[in-house]
Image: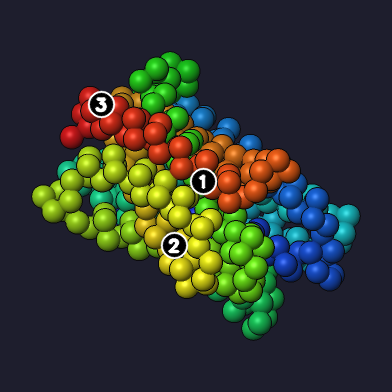
């Protein structure tokens, strides 16, 4: 508690729980009394992505000028504002509803960018001897929250109103401000001065990885229910087990000591496992086989991002916040490409063909993993 670890990992859980609210509210928002159209619903994600990218890229400026605690608190307050906007949206008239939701996603994106840059950096610094484990477990906790939050939302909806869950999350975010804050670390270089060419391989690696993650996460239900003509519930289960496999993989692989499983070797091998899933999934037919394949895809995706984060921070200790922010921004851009980019392409080729072509991402991912794990201070 005194080192601020509770606040760091608590923020990770709350970030995951908050980030998934708009996707979870999709069916409710499109139904009465809100009647949000599909086009308007799709627009909600634009402020979120833009806000996350801008916040992630400016996180080092905040850290350099006002310190790590200010960066953490600003991210917390942005998330509080986002939850407040959701509560307002629940009872807002139609003329205010869309503005409240767009404002919410904008604040959420800013909070996501600032908070993730702060907590990934702080976890790596506070657990310097086990940085890879700390960052991997932190991201596993974020993933676990994304799986649990929709269930909590459903429970509050049945008991009272869906607005109660964002209200609870907003109060929990405020509670983080009264917890002990992490001790201040060394002053870092911020802004454009912190950017270095050596950061590019890490950012490109995360961006490409996020395209793969978005291709699995955003298109699992379509692949299973539409392309393979299986029930929608089967597609939902495949998606749930993809995220569940990723979360479980992060907890398990993060816990294994270096002498049991080399992190450098794992980092270089998992792109081939991701490629194998892209190749195999379109050819499967049975529901059980598809569900298992997406669960294994989640496990394959478990560690590439947190290991890239750990190696990137270790290689740039004087600009660690800039490095963390850059990777969070790369993650959001890649997720956007993987989630939305595959839609227009299906006018020309099928989703199955796109999945098989996506296996080629393993080549640059492996090359970049070799480069990144050889970087200065990587050990």
Rendering quarter of residue 250: bottom left
Q: Quadrant of the C terminus?
A: top left
Residue 154 percent location from the top left of the image: 61, 75
The numbered mark, 3 or 2, whose residue comes first in the sequence reads 2
Which disc is residue 375 wearing? 3
Residue at the image point whose x is 82% and y is 59% from the top: 36
Residue 68 visible in the displayed image: no
In this rendering, the label closer to the viewer, 2 or 1: 1
Which disc is residue 356 wearing? 1
Left or right, residue 361 beside residue 92: left
Residue at the image point whose x is 56% and y is 59% from the top: 220
Residue at the image point whose x is 66% and y is 63% from the top: 226
Residue at the image point whose x is 83% and y is 57% from the top: 37
Instruction: Identify the residue under disc 2.
Output: 293
Q: Nearer the viewer, residue 80 or 310?
A: 310
Q: Quadrant of the N terminus?
A: bottom left
Which secondary structure lies at badge 2?
helix
The numbered mark, 2 or 1, whose residue comes first in the sequence reads 2
Q: Residues within 10 Å of mark 3 (few under 14, many from 20)?
A: some
The residue most toward the right is: 95
Report if the CB atoms under discs 1 and 3 are less than 8 Å apart.
no
Query: 53 above or below 97?
Result: above
Residue 234 percent location from the top left of the image: 57, 72
């Amino acid at each position: 508690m005194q080192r601020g670890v509770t606040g760091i990992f608590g923020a990770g859980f709350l970030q995951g729980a908050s980030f998934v609210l708009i996707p979870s509210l999709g069916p409710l928002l499109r139904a009465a009394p809100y009647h949000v159209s599909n086009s308007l619903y799709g627009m909600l994600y634009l402020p979120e992505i833009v806000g996350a990218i801008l916040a992630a890229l400016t996180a080092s400026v905040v850290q350099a000028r006002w310190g790590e605690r200010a960066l953490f608190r600003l991210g917390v307050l942005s998330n509080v504002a986002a939850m407040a906007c959701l509560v307002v949206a629940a009872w807002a008239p139609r003329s205010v509803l869309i503005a409240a939701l767009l404002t919410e996603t904008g604040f959420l994106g800013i909070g996501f960018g600032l908070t993730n840059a702060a907590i990934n950096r702080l976890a790596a610094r506070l657990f310097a001897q086990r940085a890879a484990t700390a960052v991997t477990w932190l991201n596993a906790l974020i993933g676990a929250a994304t799986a649990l939050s929709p269930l909590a939302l459903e429970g509050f909806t049945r008991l009272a109103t869906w607005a109660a869950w964002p209200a609870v999350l907003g109060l929990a975010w405020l509670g983080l401000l009264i917890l002990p804050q992490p001790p201040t670390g060394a002053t870092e270089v911020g802004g454009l001065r912190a950017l270095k060419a050596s950061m590019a391989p890490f950012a490109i690696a995360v961006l490409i990885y996020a395209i793969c993650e978005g291709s699995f996460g955003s298109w699992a239900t379509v692949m299973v229910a539409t392309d393979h003509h299986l029930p929608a519930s089967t597609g939902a289960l495949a998606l749930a087990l993809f995220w569940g496999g990723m979360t479980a993989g992060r907890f398990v692989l993060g816990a294994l000591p270096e002498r049991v499983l080399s992190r450098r070797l794992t980092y270089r091998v998992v792109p081939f496992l991701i490629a194998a899933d892209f190749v195999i999934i379109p050819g499967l037919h049975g529901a059980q086989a598809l569900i298992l394949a997406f669960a294994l895809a989640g496990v394959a995706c478990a560690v590439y991002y947190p290991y890239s984060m750990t190696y990137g921070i270790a290689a740039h200790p004087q600009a660690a916040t800039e490095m963390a922010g850059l990777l969070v921004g790369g993650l959001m851009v890649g997720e956007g490409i993987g989630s939305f980019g595959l839609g227009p392409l299906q006018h020309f080729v099928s989703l199955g063909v796109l999945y098989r072509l996506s296996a080629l991402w393993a080549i640059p991912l492996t090359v970049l993993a070799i480069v990144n794990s050889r970087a200065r201070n990587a050990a």
